[in-house]
Image: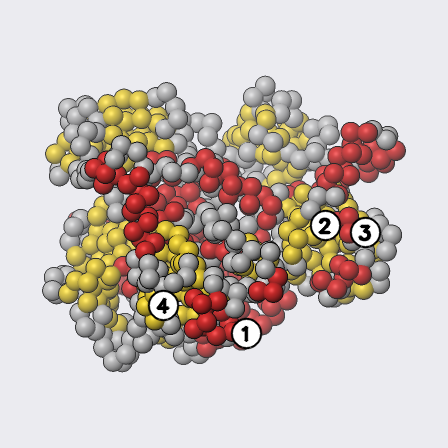
Amino acid sequence: TSLKNITGKVTNLNAALADVNIVIKNRNIGTKTNAKGAYVIQVKIGDQIQYSYVGFKTITIAVEDITSVLNINMITENNLLEETIVQADKSPSRVLELAIKKQKIIKTSRGTFNPEAFNVKYMDGKNIDFRYSSLAKAIAYRFSGVSIVTINFIDYIYVRGAKAVWEVDGAVYDIEPPIDLSQIKDISIPMSNGAFVRWGGPVVIVRTKYGSPENKEALKKEIAEKYTNKNYYNDDAVAFSDSNISANNHSSLKEISGTVKNLDKPLANVNITINNKNKNLKSNVQGNYNIKANIGDLIQFRYMGFKTVTIIVEDITSVLNINMVTEVIKLDETVLATNNYEGKTLKNEKKKKRKFLSARGTINPDRAGYSVGYFDGINLNNVYGSLTQALVGRVSGYYIKDGKPYLRGTKTPILSAPAIWEVDGIVSTDEPYLDLSQIKDIHFLKSLASTNRYGSAGMGGVIVVSTKYGSFSDTKNKKQNTADKYTNKNIYTDDAVSLDINSNYNNEDIDSLIAIKIKTKAFAYYQNSLKHTIKDYNVQIDLAKAFKNYYKDLNLVSQILMDIAYSHNKNSEILKAVAFQMQAYGLKNEVIKVYERIFKLRPHYAQSYRDLANAYKDDEQFNKSWKLYMSYLLQGNDVENEGIGQILYSEMEWLYFNEKNQALKNIQFVPKSKSIKDFKNDVRLVFEWNTSEAEFDLEFVNPNKQVYNFEHSLVKDPQLISDEKRKGYSSKEFIIDNLNDGKWLVNITYLGNKKPEPTYIKVTVYNHWGNTNQQEKISVYKLDKEHTKLKLYNIDNRSLIMVSK
């Protein structure tokens, strides 16, 4: 077996470790890290590399065929003997620190929890012994009254003789969920009956470093304080300092080049800067530029009279061709009214007095005879987990108790009932799931005179929410159609052209392959010649597609696609394009291999979790799929709002409600839908694209030829593009609730991707989503013609899908 070089860096808490011993087990070969923690070592595939350092856990990693870089984060070794010595040494500072941690009041699923009131057994996460395979084993017998029972290979914690449940970062589980022991912050075990009453029995309360409600609340306050009253994307993009992309390696500079244009004409002297760094340059007379940046940096393009363009640098960013758009500057009405902020105050006052519709009729705050509170939705954003939390401190008398909103303050105990919600005419006792950025107005009805029309349900007041896309139509009892949010009230003029997705090759090499006619000879020609001469991956994918269409041999097509994957195994965008084709051809095993490789390249990307979990699901490896979804959930990631979270939750609900997966319910998961009946829809469409820079305009045409648009572009929605890059996803879900008897059309206009390569977009259409007769169709499109509207689908009740030819 040939030798290969493995390089990397060894760190602890982002600090370089020098003189770490690195050896190959069972072979007399080794090295040490230098002063910067870097190393290089020659190995064979199958070797085991061992990293050891005094005071740290020894790490052993097996070398695979694709292994080339191994960056190691070493973890301190917890020695039980040393723990005993520390406990015996009654250091006032350590004792005081533990006492303060033990007494800290925390938020739980059963309300605020004060450890002093419940005789709590406390354990600092630093004292966990990582040698144990589960947290249950790590804490068993450490405290009197706490023990462990193993049933069917599952460890259960017993407190005072009764089985305990687990509460991890506010979520309750019957059995211990998968937890990274190194990420645990605190463990509290209440011993008193008062706590048992709250949870219906004993409980083990665990707080992690990344997901505790207290940490999330602190982050929200920090972000809100830092970015209050700041406008436009340029500042929003850096609001989350702990973004997934910034978690990647920043140590090496990437060279990025491109051309800046407007309407296909080059722009000279465009200011190009890296945000928060003293680095800038200008484009030359041809509009060209070249700049070096780190992964996670923000490159900004500024030019007088044009909108500023801000791009987040990713691991694969190398070419950025920028098309700048002229900025239409409107005078702020505040400037016309006065030199101070009275104009905005006046504008808000006018909104407050404006009539508004409710489920109980029209309300005119100016003539109602009672006070109506008002809050402008423009001041909300999705940094908050819910609207209930977002309104704290913004409304007089408003507070939260047991997760419910109260409007009348704590001084009116007789009327101490939670407020009810009314959203676009639909009344509910529970807060509905809302995209906070889509809220237009919020009115607060507090007085009895204003709420008597709601009956006894409105005794605690009513929070009336109007969204930007809401209505009072007869369909208000149905789910809000996602496409309704993007309506532009236009009528379709049949201006989309058909796209032939199977024969748009336009390549002499592929034409010569097709001309051979005999499959075995054609494949030999590919292996001996085309495999080595065709360098563009998109032409290679076209070659695989041609082989599929003309020779109908999936085994040979699989070999061609895997060849592409191996030759581009460090480029996640190319790998994703290959995976799209594999999914369209039903190559399930190959798809898993490619998505596992992408997961290794991008372990912090939300899309990596979703793609691999979905690949496992399609291969009926449901337990693997569920565990991957849950691991993303347990890290405290958002799965409620639009974007990747919406898609993840939809697919978790599918697993939850599918009859053959009922065993998965032993891990607690609360679906948004109350039953399988609520979960069902006529059609679900999931769009995925292989490059984060892709820009396009989706057009949905209903049976009445009304047009609904979703434009995915930096100009139209910079905050969405920023969110996608920070979280690491490139997908979008749409639901058509009711097909009726007509036909829906789906079209796309491609707007480019800032580089010469095409964009691959995969569209998965699920007919009768969630039903037993659910059908699924995958189509993959190569988009390389800009500003041409293409037909994708016709969808109706009588046929599954009619794909554009």
Tag 2 near tag 3, CB within 8 Å: no
Residue 3 circle label: none
In the rendered image, the vertical position of residue 507 relative to residue 535, given as above or below: below
Q: Name the residue at 62% across, 30% down.
A: 12
Please give the label number shown on residue 358: 4
The span from disc 2 to disc 4 (Cα, nearest Å) is 41 Å
Image quadrant where residue 339 sits: top left
Residue type at numbered disc 4: Ser
Q: Is residue 338 left or right of residue 162?
A: left
**SS class, disc 2:** loop
Q: CA distance from mark 4 to mark 1?
A: 43 Å
Q: Nearer the viewer, mark 1 or mark 3?
A: 3
Q: Earlier in the sequence, mark 1 or mark 3?
A: 3
Mark 4 or mark 3: whose residue is earlier in sequence = 3
Alpha-carbon distance for marks 4 and 3? Answer: 49 Å
In this rendering, the label closer to the viewer, 4 or 3? 4
Label 3 packing within 10 angstroms: few (<14), some (14-19), many (20+): some
Mark 2–mark 3 distance (CA, rounded to whole Å): 10 Å
Q: Amino acid at mark 2?
A: Asn
**Dot 2, crowdedness within 10 Å: few (<14), some or many (≥20)?**
some
Q: Which mark is residue 119?
A: 3
* Vertical arrangement, residue 13 with respect to residue 526, above or below: above
Question: Which label lies toward us, 2 or 4?
Answer: 4
> In the structure shown, which secondary structural element does the residue marked by tag 4 occupy?
strand
Q: Mark 2 = which residue?
A: 114
How far apart in space, not on screen, are marks 1 and 2 (Cα)?
42 Å
Residue annotated with mark 1: 660
In the image shown, does 53 or 683 lie closer to the viewer? 683
Precedes in sequence: disc 1 or disc 2: 2
Q: Amino acid at mark 1?
A: Lys
Q: Residues within 10 Å of mark 4 (few under 14, many from 20)?
A: some
